[in-house]
Amino acid sequence: MSQNIRFTLPQADIPKQWYNLLADFPEPLPPPLHPGTRQPVPPEMLTQIFPENLVRQEMCPDQYVEIPEPVREVYSLWRPTPLLRAVRLERALNTPAHIYYKYEGASPAGSHKVNTSVPQAYFNKAAGTKRLATETGAGQWGSSLALACQLFGMECNVYMVKVSYQQKPYRRMLMHTWGATVHASPSDQTNFGRKLLAEDPNCPGSLGIAISEAVEDTVTHPNTKYSLGSVLNHVCLHQTVIGQEAIRQMEMAGEEPDSIYACAGGGSNFAGIAFPFLQLKIKKKKNYRIVAVEPSACPSLTQGELRYDFGDTAETTPLVMMYTLGHKFMPPSIHAGGLRYHGMSPMVSHALKLGLIEAQAIHQTRVFEAGTLFARTEGIVPAPESAHAIAAVITEAEQAREAGKKRVILFNLSGHGLLDLSAYETYLQGKIQDV
């Protein structure tokens, strides 16, 4: 075993470009459709809620997109993030597998989400936007956008899924600390929110509902644009700094992964680590096994349908081709709030359709068991979302032990769980239930 189990890159090696998987898909991605005409959405329709510069990125055919230097300067607060080998976890599992993880919890907001919140705030600021409206599930995205807006001098208005607003008060406090306004969704701030509260005052909310509120907020307030933390092409694009760094760091480790894992809700952190490796799989015929891991309570990839559907509950967004449980689906109140979304990124969905990736679904008791083991061996308390990937990795490592075969496994630890400790306490008290 190598003495060096932590692999870091100098700041000069922060990627200078984002990688665009759209350019390398063997079949083109189906375009978003206008909900009325069912015709491909023209760019000018998207500029109603997004700035033109981000719309161009959403539809960009180029293989690489340059990262502006002001964005790289902010990235340097935490990037490049470390790659670590989980030697103590390997010992606890008594496995011949080598387990590596890319740790995105090193960012100021504690997750990978700042990889896209920073460029989104930068491009909005350059376009003259004064205020951003958004949704958030567990609060990692809302926190990240609040920070980015503070850095670029913009207002931030966040609609946080009500069950997470109640379960995760410290994420809400973090958003307040960075100057954002936060509403429990469904809220009394929008027509759609008021309608849902009248129908069910105890509605726990969902990401689809929060998206609807944020979009309504956008079109009813001046100098406001909408910002999304996952799902869309330009969001996945920004996250590819993760995988680009990981490829270099695995080379430093002198190994190449057999399997690559990440949790998947809307698809952004999965895209971040997976898409650069998918380029090697497509272009250089690398035989990687790339697995998206989702909650059994919200299994869009493993039980959803691949079809055109709305990204939000109120049917205000364009239709996109994705694996979906239906935009009216109300996910159970699991603790991994960032994975409670009815659909999956069109790009991730397309990769699954083409057989480039696989998908697994895991119950939350298994997730917290895995997250607790990781915390007790590696010292890092993982976010409940990230612990889905850890649970799948542990299963493969155990299979490697039974087969007596070495495997090299890489996963994305998308964020820490220090603001999710109430969920861990619930698990440790034996109160976590599978849905």
Image: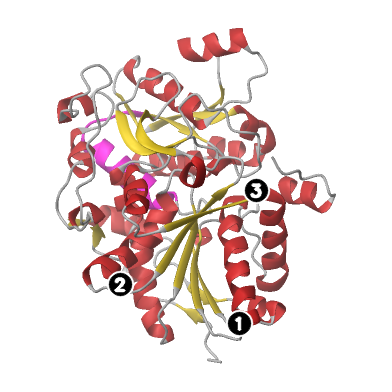
Q: Along the line of sight, which residue is nearer the eye, 387 or 323?
A: 323
At a point 61% along the width and 74% down the height, the residue shown is 399
Tell me the element at label 1.
Answer: helix
Tell me the element at label 2.
Answer: helix
Residue 345: % across, % down: 37, 43
Are dots 2 and 3 in contact, CB under 8 Å?
A: no
Q: Amino acid at mark 3?
A: Leu
State the CA–CA distance, disc 1 to disc 3.
38 Å
Are dots 1 and 2 in contact, CB under 8 Å?
A: no
Residue 277: % across, % down: 33, 67
Q: Along the line of sight, which residue is nearer the eye, 349 or 228?
A: 349
Q: Amino acid at mark 2?
A: Asp
If you read the primary sequence from the N terminus, does the residue marked by circle 2 or circle 3 appear first? 2
Disc 1 versus disc 3: nearer the observer: 1
Residue projecting furthest to the right: 429
* Residue 412 visible from this viewpoint: yes
Q: Along the line of sight, which residue is nearer the eye, 382 or 302?
A: 302
Look at mark 2 in the image and give the residue it sits on.
Answer: 13
* Residue 87 visible from this viewpoint: no
Q: Amino acid at mark 1?
A: Ala
Residue 262: % across, % down: 49, 59
Look at mark 3 in the image and give the residue it sits on.
Answer: 419
Look at mark 1 in the image and give the residue it sits on.
Answer: 403
Question: Start and end of the magenta stretch?
Answer: 113-132
At a point 61% along the width and 53% down the height, the residue shown is 383
